[in-house]
Image (tube, rainbow, N blue to C red):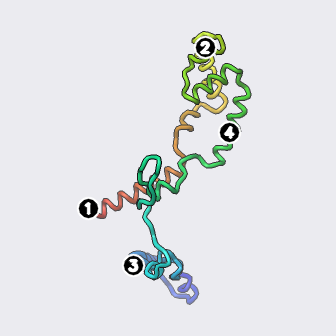
């Protein structure tokens, strides 16, 4: 396009689309043809680089003897550090407002421990411990928002984008093979 503009030739959109599709089908790249480019056929033939599929098995997890793919090893499935830091700031402020029994209830819930273990330790009835648990739930919703439980359970947005792209490619592949 730039070359035709410099030479002041007239080019229609159909011409640009036709040659673009033609180059893409033949495997040409839009930016350069250097052999250092990993997708350039000459670079792969010379042995300077290789292209790997994300579904290729690369390692074995020693703890479970399961094969891992490159796709499973690369992305971090947790929140990004900025989101974690913001949640930690909000959480720390909220925890400072809790009394000892409510903090103990929170610790039991986080460690999957029975709340009945607090009955003897604080010499309170089960209903009192349950009231502290209900108070903790109200406080969390009040401090962190009504939709905090949904936010905690949903996956990071960037992970959704990866899955959507993968599903789209799978659908295209299935459609092209039938």
Instruction: Please identify the quarter of the rendering in which residue 119 is found.
Output: top right
Query: Tag 1's secondary structure?
Result: loop
Residue at the left extreme, as displayed = 178
Relative to 117, say whether 62 is above or below: below
Q: Comparing marks 1 and 4, which lies closer to the viewer?
A: 4
Query: Which residue in the protein does label 1 denote?
Result: 178
Label 1 CA crowd tier, 10 Å (few <14, some 14–19, many 20+): few
Residue 119 is tagged as: 2
Q: What residue is at 58 percent from the left and 16 percent from the top? A: 130
| Lower position in the chain sequence, tag 4 or tag 2 | 4
The answer to whether residue 22 of the structure is visible from this angle is yes
| Lower position in the chain sequence, tag 1 or tag 2 | 2
Query: Tag 2's secondary structure?
Result: helix
| Lower position in the chain sequence, tag 2 or tag 3 | 3
| Lower position in the chain sequence, tag 3 or tag 1 | 3
Mark 1 touching mark 4, by CB under 8 A?
A: no
Answer with left or right where residue 148 lies relative to residue 56: right
Instruction: Please identify the quarter of the rendering in which residue 58 is found.
Output: bottom left
Q: Where is residue 92 in the image (x, y as percent from the top left)?
A: 71, 34
Q: Rounded to the nearest whole Å, what is the CA distance between mark 4 and mark 3?
A: 51 Å
Label 4 CA crowd tier, 10 Å (few <14, some 14–19, many 20+): few
Relative to 159, say whether 22 is above or below: below
Q: Comparing marks 4 and 2, which lies closer to the viewer?
A: 2
Q: Rounded to the nearest whole Å, what is the CA distance between mark 4 and mark 2?
A: 29 Å
Query: Tag 4's secondary structure?
Result: helix
């Amino acid at each position: 396009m730039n070359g035709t503009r410099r030479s002041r030739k007239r080019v229609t959109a159909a011409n640009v689309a036709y040659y673009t599709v033609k180059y893409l089908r033949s495997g040409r790249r839009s930016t350069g043809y250097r052999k250092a480019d990993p997708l350039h056929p000459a670079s792969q033939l010379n042995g300077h680089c290789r292209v790997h599929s994300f579904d290729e098995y690369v390692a074995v997890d020693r703890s479970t003897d399961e094969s891992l793919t490159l796709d499973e090893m690369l992305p971090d499935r947790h929140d990004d550090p900025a989101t974690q830091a913001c949640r930690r700031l909000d959480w720390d402020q909220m925890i400072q407002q809790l009394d000892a029994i409510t903090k103990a209830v929170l610790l039991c819930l986080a460690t999957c421990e029975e709340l009945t273990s607090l009955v003897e330790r604080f010499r309170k009835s089960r209903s009192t411990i349950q009231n502290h648990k209900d108070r903790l739930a109200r406080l969390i919703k009040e401090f962190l928002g009504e939709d905090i439980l949904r936010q905690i359970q949903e996956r990071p947005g960037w992970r959704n984008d990866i899955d959507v792209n993968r599903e789209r490619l799978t659908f295209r592949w299935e459609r092209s093979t039938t």
